[in-house]
Image (spheres, rainbow, N blue to C red):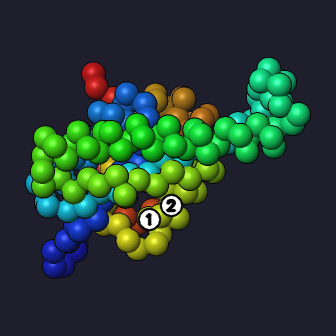
Amino acid sequence: MMSGTMKITRILFATDLSPVADHAFKYAANFANALGVEVTVLHVLEKLRPNAELMLSALLNYDDPEALRAATQSNLMERVKDHISGLCRDAACSMPGCGFDAGRVIIEPGDPVHIILSHLDSGKFDLLIMGTMGYGVVEEFFIGSTAHKVLRKTRVPVLVVPERG
């Protein structure tokens, strides 16, 4: 049994930019508005598989995958940040107390589970909000989901928002 009260002051919202994540974004905005807290938005750019990098490099006339990565990562990160910042501005306009600020948008390359957990382990967040596709038992067993993997490894409370039905 937990004694005392839990105070939520900072929320981490993890997004993969999918429609499910956009749906979960509304929950993050409403929580932030109701609690008067700030939200940090995190998007992780997953690395492509080596064979996909080679194919894209050849298709786009880059000498090697490293040249492709260098040329596209900063451009892609800017486009993603602009998209997320737009969502944040829209939420802030419709709910002035919701705590979204474009300055609290984090975009990092890497493994989503590892990056999300490292931010949660920093101790800066009291709640994680993220969407899930709602894989069935068989799919979950073989491929898992980011939400499921994070849930198994974190001590921070997590609100997992399912796909709309």
Q: Amino acid at mark 1?
A: Leu
Q: Residues within 10 Å of mark 1 (few under 14, many from 20)?
A: many
Q: Residue at x 76, y 37 (%)?
A: 68
Q: Does residue 58 appear anywhere in the picture?
A: yes
Alpha carbon separation for disc pair 2 and 1: 5 Å
Q: Is residue 79 left or right of residue 109?
A: left
Where does label 1 land, which residue? 120
Q: Is residue 28 left or right of residue 58?
A: left
Q: Is residue 77 above or below residue 22?
A: below
Amino acid type assigned to the residue bearing label 2 in the image: Leu
The percent coordinates of residue 19 (x first, y second) are 37, 27
| Mark 2 residue element | helix
Crowding at label 2, few (<14), some or many (≥20) Cα neighbours within 10 Å? Answer: some
x and y percentages locating residue 142 in the rendered image: 61, 34
Where disc 1 sits, the SS reads: helix
Q: Quadrant of the N terminus?
A: bottom left
Residue 102, disc: none
Q: Is residue 160 left or right of residue 5?
A: right
Looking at the rendered image, the quarter that the C terminus falls into is top left
| Residue nearer the viewer, 140 or 87 | 87
- Dots 2 and 1: beta carbons under 8 Å? yes
Residue 14 point in image, percent of width and height: 41, 48
Q: Going by the picture, which residue comes out furthest to the bottom?
A: 4
Q: Residue 44: percent from the left, percent from the top? A: 54, 47
Looking at the rendered structure, which numbered label has been put on residue 117? 2
x 32%, y 39%: residue: 86
- The quadrant where residue 38 appears: bottom left
The residue closer to the viewer here, 19 or 55, is 55
